[in-house]
C-alpha cells in the first residue's frame, strides 16, 4: 500500500476509534440477542463478516426471536438497510475508476458512522476519500465482530445493556455525528421531513417500524435532493 494511501487509511482508523465504543456496546447487545435466537459465537461472527449491517442484523434477529419466521426477518432487515443504497450512491466520485473488487469492498464496508465521519471531516476542510472510508469501515467491522462474538459467547455472564443504561451509547454516537454534519438551518427541512415521516408511519400506519425507518430515510433524501435543485 503506497505511503499516502496507508496514511489516509490510518487516519480513518484513528478518527473512527471514539465511535467504536458505542459500536462495542451495540455489538454486545446484539450478541446477547443472537444467543437468545440460538446462535453461537461462530455463527454470530460469520453473520457480522458477511452481512455487516448492525441495525439490520438486530432487527432481523429480533424478528426471529419474536417468531416472525425467516422471510419476515430478512424482509425487516432489508427494509432497514435500504438507506445504504442512498449512501453508497453518493460515493460515485470515490468509487469512480477503481477496480471492481475495491468498489465491492467499499460498498460492503460503508456504514452510517464512517460515511458520516468522512463527510464531517471534509466539512472541516480536511482531506478524506476512499481509503479514509475503508479505514473507518475496517476498524468498525473488527470491533463489531469481536463484540458480537463476545456477547454471544458470554451471554449468561453479561448484564442487559438496557438495565445499566448503555443501550443509549449508539444513539449518542449518532447524535455526535449529526451535530458535526449540520451546516445550519438549511439542513433542518430534510431532517424534519425524515423524522416526521418515520415517526408518523411508525405510530399511525399498520407496518413494521423498520419499514417506517426506511421510508423516513427515503423521504428525507428526496427532500434534500429537491432542495439542492431549487
Image (cartoon, helix red, strand yellow):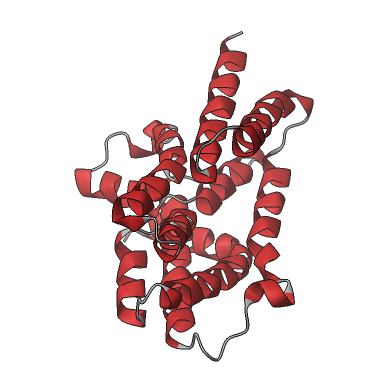
**How many numbered markers are drawn?**
0
User: Residue 197 in the image: x percent, y percent?
Assistant: 62, 29
Front in this rendered view, residue 77 or 201: 201
Rendered-image quadrant of the C terminus: top right
Extreme residue toward the bottom, this view: 157
Residue shown at the point (41%, 52%) measured from the top left? 131
- Where does the N terminus fall, quadrant-wise? bottom left
Dividing the picture into quadrants, the one containing residue 190 is: top right
Q: What percent of the width, then of the height, locates residue 129?
A: 46, 45
Residue at 68 percent across and 30 percent down: it is 196
65 horizontally vs 14: left or right = left
Quick one: 149 or 20, which is closer to the camera? Answer: 149
The residue at the point 51 percent across, 64 percent down is 13
Q: Is residue 220 placed above or below 136 in the rendered structure?
A: above
Name the one closer to the observer, 155 or 123.
155
Q: Can residue 17 be seen from the camera position used here?
A: yes
Q: Residue furthest top?
A: 230
Amino acid at each position: 500500500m503506497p505511503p499516502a494511501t496507508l496514511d489516509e487509511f490510518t487516519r480513518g482508523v484513528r478518527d473512527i476509534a471514539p465511535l467504536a465504543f458505542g459500536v462495542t456496546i451495540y455489538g454486545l447487545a446484539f450478541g446477547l440477542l443472537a444467543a437468545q435466537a440460538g446462535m453461537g459465537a461462530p455463527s454470530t461472527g460469520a453473520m457480522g463478516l458477511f452481512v455487516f449491517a448492525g441495525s439490520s442484523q438486530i432487527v432481523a434477529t429480533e424478528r426471529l426471536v419474536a417468531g416472525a419466521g425467516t422471510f419476515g426477518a430478512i424482509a425487516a432487515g432489508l427494509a432497514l438497510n435500504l438507506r445504504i443504497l442512498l449512501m453508497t450512491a453518493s460515493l460515485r466520485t470515490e468509487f469512480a475508476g477503481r477496480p471492481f473488487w475495491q468498489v465491492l469492498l467499499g460498498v460492503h464496508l460503508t456504514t452510517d458512522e464512517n460515511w458520516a465521519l468522512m463527510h464531517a471531516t471534509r466539512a472541516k476542510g480536511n482531506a478524506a476519500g476512499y481509503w479514509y472510508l475503508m479505514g473507518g469501515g475496517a476498524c468498525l467491522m473488527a470491533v463489531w465482530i469481536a463484540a458480537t462474538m463476545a456477547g454471544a459467547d458470554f451471554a449468561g455472564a453479561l448484564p442487559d445493556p438496557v438495565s445499566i443504561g448503555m443501550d443509549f451509547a449508539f444513539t449518542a454516537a449518532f447524535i455526535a455525528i449529526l451535530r458535526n454534519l449540520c451546516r445550519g438551518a438549511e439542513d433542518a427541512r430534510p431532517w424534519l421531513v425524515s423524522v416526521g415521516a418515520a415517526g408518523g408511519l411508525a405510530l399511525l400506519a399498520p407496518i413494521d417500524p423498520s419499514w417506517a425507518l426506511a421510508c423516513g430515510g427515503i423521504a428525507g433524501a428526496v427532500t434534500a435532493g429537491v432542495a439542492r435543485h431549487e
